[in-house]
Image (spheres, grey):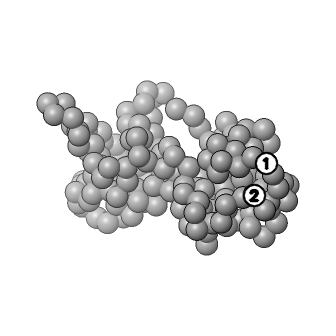
C-alpha cells in the first residue's frame, strides 16, 4: 500500500503522469484530452491498528471514494458499491458500518469488516482530504510543466474521474 503523500515530489508526480497518461514529457500539446483520461488505478485501504483489514480490488481507482461516501450516506443498506467488480457492499446499523467483499473465487469466503460509524466517517473525511491534496499537487505540477488552464481538468480526471 502506498499513501498518496508518497508522491509529493516533482519527480514522483512526473512518474505518475508519465505512467498513467503515457506522457513522454514532450510538452503540454502531447498531453491527452480530458475526455480520454481515466482515474489513476488503486483505491482505498482500511487500516486498523496498523493492520490492513481491506485493500482495494484489482479494478478500483482513486475516484471510487465518491462511491464509498454515497453508499455510506445511503442509509441502512446493504448498499452495493459501484467500484471494482462491484463486489463490495456497506450496511449501516446501530452505530456500526459493516463492509462485505463478496468473493469472486469459488469456495473462498467473503471478507467482512466492521467499525464504528464515527470512525468510518472520520476515515472517509481523512481520505477525502488526502484525495483533494493529491489532486492539487498534480494540478500544481502540471502548471509548472506548462499545462496552464488544462491543469485543473487533467488533475481532476486523474483523481476524481471528472474534469469539473
Determine which residue is flagged by label 1. Answer: 25
Determine which residue is flagged by label 2. Answer: 30
**Considering only order in the chain, which callout, 1 or 2, is on the residue closer to the N terminus?**
1
Task: Measure the alpha-carbon separation of dots 2 and 1.
Answer: 8 Å
The furthest residue to the bottom: 164
Q: Are marks 2 and 1 in contact (CB under 8 Å)?
A: yes
Q: x%, y% of residue 64?
A: 45, 55
Q: x%, y% of residue 78?
A: 22, 57
Q: x%, y% of residue 76?
A: 24, 61
Q: x%, y% of residue 156?
A: 63, 62
Tell me the quadrant of the picture where the C terminus can be found: bottom right
Residue at x-position 27% and y-position 57%: 80
Residue at x-position 27% and y-position 43%: 101
Image check: 57 left or right of 22? Answer: left
Q: Quadrant of residue 34?
A: bottom right
Residue at x-position 39% and y-position 41%: 57
In depth, the one of 97 and 130 nearer the eye is 130
Q: How many marks?
A: 2
Residue at x-position 32% and y-position 49%: 85
Examine the rendering and report whether any part of residue 38 can be seen. yes
Image check: 75 left or right of 12? Answer: left
Relative vertical location of residue 6 with respect to residue 162 in this rendering, above or below? above
Image check: 102 left or right of 13? Answer: left
In depth, the one of 62 and 33 nearer the eye is 33
Examine the rendering and report whether any part of residue 129 can be seen. no
Amino acid at each position: 500500500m502506498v499513501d498518496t503523500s508518497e508522491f509529493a515530489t516533482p519527480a514522483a508526480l512526473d512518474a505518475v503522469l508519465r505512467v498513467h497518461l503515457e506522457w513522454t514529457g514532450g510538452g503540454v500539446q502531447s498531453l491527452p484530452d480530458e475526455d480520454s483520461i481515466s482515474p489513476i488505478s488503486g483505491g482505498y485501504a482500511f487500516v486498523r491498528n496498523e493492520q490492513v483489514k481491506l485493500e482495494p480490488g484489482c479494478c478500483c481507482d482513486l475516484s471510487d471514494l465518491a462511491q464509498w461516501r454515497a453508499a455510506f450516506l445511503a442509509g441502512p443498506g446493504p448498499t452495493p458499491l459501484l467500484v471494482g467488480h462491484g463486489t463490495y457492499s456497506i450496511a449501516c446499523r446501530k452505530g456500526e458500518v459493516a463492509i462485505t467483499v463478496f468473493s469472486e473465487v469459488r469456495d473462498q469466503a467473503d471478507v467482512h469488516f466492521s467499525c464504528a460509524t464515527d470512525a468510518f466517517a472520520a476515515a472517509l473525511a481523512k481520505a477525502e482530504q488526502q484525495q483533494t491534496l493529491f489532486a492539487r499537487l498534480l494540478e500544481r505540477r502540471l502548471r509548472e510543466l506548462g499545462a496552464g488552464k488544462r491543469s485543473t481538468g487533467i488533475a481532476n480526471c486523474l483523481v476524481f474521474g471528472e474534469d469539473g
